[in-house]
């Protein structure tokens, strides 16, 4: 169980980083706001895009670790 949680946390960290980068690029590319575009991009990326993909990454990591069991270490 701990292995599944650890895998989920690692995938969540990767998902958060990916979500921040992708969301920041999308907001800076498509936003019509020119007054405070940098603030909008950073706030949206860190508080919307990052957490959304972190949740997806956590679920993906747990499911992936459950489907692919680790090799049996009791055999020599």
Image: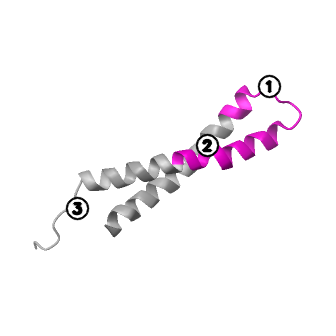
Q: Secondary structure at mark 1?
A: loop
Q: Which residues are the magenta region?
A: 26-53
Cα distance between the residues tagged 2 and 3: 32 Å
Residue 3 is drawn in which quadrant?
bottom left
Residue that numbered label 2 is attached to: 49
How far is the residue under mark 2 from the one under mark 1?
A: 18 Å
Res. 7 mark: none
Neighbor class of circle 3 (other Cα within 10 Å; few <14, some 14-19, many 20+) is few
Q: Residue at x 33, y 51 (%)?
A: 63
Q: CA distance from mark 3 to mark 1?
A: 49 Å
Tell me, yes or no, whether the highlighted magenta stretch contains residue 38: yes
Q: Quadrant of the N terminus?
A: bottom left
Alpha-carbon neighbours of circle 2 within 10 Å: few (<14), some, or many (≥20)? Answer: many
| Residue 2 place in picture, x, y as percent | 34, 69
Give the residue at mark 1.
32
Give whichever of discs 2 and 1 has the lower sequence position: 1
Disc ID at residue 70: 3
x and y percentages locating residue 23 in the rendered image = 64, 38
Query: The C terminus appears in which quarter of the rendering?
Result: bottom left
Q: Nearer the viewer, residue 14 or 51?
A: 51
- Outermost left residue: 75
Q: Position of residue 53 (x, y in %)?
A: 53, 45
Q: Nearer the viewer, mark 2 or mark 3?
A: 2
Instruction: Name the colouring of the figure.
Output: one colour
Q: Residue at x 39, y 48 (%)?
A: 60
Element under label 2?
A: helix
Residue 42 quadrant:
top right
Q: Main secondary structure of the magenta part?
A: helix
Q: Which-is-in-front pick, marks 3 and 1?
A: 1
């Amino acid at each position: 169980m701990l292995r599944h949680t650890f895998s989920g946390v690692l995938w969540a960290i990767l998902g958060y980083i990916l979500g921040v980068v992708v969301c920041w690029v999308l907001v800076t590319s498509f936003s019509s706001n020119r007054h405070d575009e940098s603030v909008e991009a950073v706030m949206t990326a860190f508080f919307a895009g990052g957490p959304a993909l972190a949740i997806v990454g956590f679920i993906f990591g747990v499911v992936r670790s459950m489907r692919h069991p680790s090799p049996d270490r009791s055999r020599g």
